[in-house]
Image: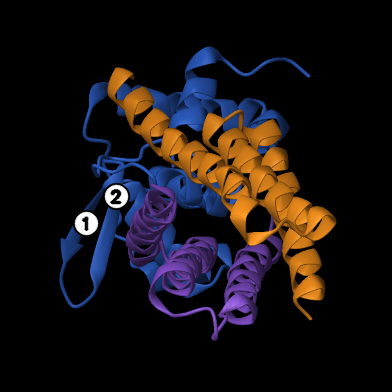
Chain colours: A blue, B orange, C purple
């Protein structure tokens, strides 16, 4: 299996820690003009509301999504910085061309619980983007 | 009864240490290696207590193992925060 | 001097408990809750040691209570480590 392009690899290692998060990000990226609620995402991806809600809120904290407060919370794909835009684009390209490699790399990330345990010992709160 | 409890405690600590070692192997995060060592020290404390049944007067030497464990945990926390500042 | 060891142990345990509890409130990750409870138990265990050795007389021994506290603490952490999908 060919290696993933460096940009995609770096983006995954830094921002994408679970398959759920990958799918949620790609879903919103495919339709950037649309505003998504957690229920809509859960329904579309056939995941639990809790999982969708948690991943949307984490992606938002990582500056990859925008959120608006209306009757519900509405999320849209909106990377705040150029390197995030490029990274997300590289990820989407890699997913289209080397899907198995992307899935494998994401799946090999240490589970969320373990990372949350380690990150708990950061005394000053910062953006835990490797989370 | 206490002997049984000590044995159970030592076994749990060893199991926890092994789990942390496994996390370290997967993540290469030093914190897990240090926690693994800390819990090994704790397991050793209870194993030695059980094996040697030290008299009260010399028991405090064994507490050094507990001290080692907590110092290792402290080192893990400090290391994590220093490493973050550098990155 | 020796009591400093237990006090240090209690303080470090408490610090760990607080950091892990803070993480749990933020992430709702079960492991952080279980490990926080473990470190609270270890802090209590260190305090029980101090009480047993320096406050109450030799007629009363907290040995069994101390062992039970330690066992419960480690059991909570072991449960958390095993329960989380890893």
- Between A67 and A57, the one lying in front of the other is A57
* Residue drawn at point x = 51 percent, y = 29 percent: A13
Which residue position is annotated with label 1?
Answer: A67
Residue C11, placed above or below residue A80: below
Mark with earlier residue (2, 1): 2
Q: Quadrant of residue B21?
A: top right
Q: Are marks 2 and 1 in contact (CB under 8 Å)?
A: yes
Task: Indicate the secondary structure of the residue bearing disc 1.
Answer: strand
* Residue drawn at point x = 51 percent, y = 37 percent: B72
- Between A35 and B20, the one lying in front of the other is B20
* Residue drawn at point x = 52 percent, y = 36 percent: B31
State left or right for residue A29 relative to residue A80. Answer: right
Chain designation of label 2: A
Q: Is disc 1 surrounded by few (<14), some (14 to 19) or many (20+) residues within 10 Å?
A: some
Q: Position of residue A120 (x, y in %)?
A: 40, 49
Which residue position is annotated with label 2?
Answer: A60
Residue C74 visible, this orientation: yes
Instruction: State whether discs 2 and 1 lie on one chain.
Output: yes
Q: Nearer the viewer, mark 2 or mark 1?
A: 2
Q: Position of residue C70 (x, y in %)?
A: 60, 69
| Quadrant of image for the N terminus of chain A | top right
Residue A39, placed above or below residue C6: below
Q: Position of residue C24 (x, y in %)?
A: 40, 64
- Between B16 and C26, the one lying in front of the other is B16
Question: In the displayed image of the protein, which residue is found farthest to the bottom?
Answer: C60
Chain designation of label 1: A
Q: Quadrant of residue A79?
A: top left
Q: Position of residue A88 (x, y in %)?
A: 41, 31
Task: Indicate the secondary structure of the residue bearing disc 2.
Answer: helix
């Amino acid at each position: 299996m060919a290696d993933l392009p460096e940009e995609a690899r770096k983006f995954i290692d830094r921002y994408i820690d679970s398959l759920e998060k990958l799918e949620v990000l790609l879903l919103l990226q495919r339709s950037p003009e649309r505003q998504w609620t957690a229920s809509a995402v859960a329904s579309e991806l056939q995941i639990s509301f809790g999982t969708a809600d948690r991943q949307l809120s984490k992606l938002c904290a990582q500056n990859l999504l925008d959120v608006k407060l209306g009757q519900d919370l509405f999320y849209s794909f909106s990377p705040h910085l150029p390197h995030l835009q490029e990274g997300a684009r590289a990820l989407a390209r890699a997913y289209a061309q080397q899907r198995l490699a992307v899935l494998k790399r994401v799946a090999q990330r240490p589970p969320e619980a373990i990372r949350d345990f380690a990150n708990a010992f950061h005394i000053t709160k910062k953006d835990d983007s490797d989370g | 009864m206490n002997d049984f409890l000590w044995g159970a405690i030592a076994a749990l600590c060893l199991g926890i240490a092994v789990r942390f070692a496994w996390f370290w192997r997967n993540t290469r995060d030093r914190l897990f290696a240090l926690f693994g060592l800390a819990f090994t020290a704790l397991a050793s404390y209870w194993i030695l207590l059980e094996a040697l049944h030290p008299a009260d007067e010399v028991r405090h030497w064994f507490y050094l193992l507990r001290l080692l464990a907590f110092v290792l945990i402290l080192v893990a926390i400090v290391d994590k925060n220093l490493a973050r500042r550098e990155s | 001097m020796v009591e400093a060891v237990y006090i240090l142990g209690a303080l470090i345990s408490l610090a760990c408990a607080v950091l892990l509890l803070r993480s749990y409130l933020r992430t709702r990750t079960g492991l952080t809750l279980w490990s926080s409870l473990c470190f609270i138990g270890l802090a209590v265990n260190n305090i029980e040691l101090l009480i047993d050795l320096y406050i109450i007389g030799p007629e009363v021994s907290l040995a069994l209570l101390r062992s039970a506290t330690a066992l419960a603490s480690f059991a909570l952490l072991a449960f958390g480590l095993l329960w989380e999908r890893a």
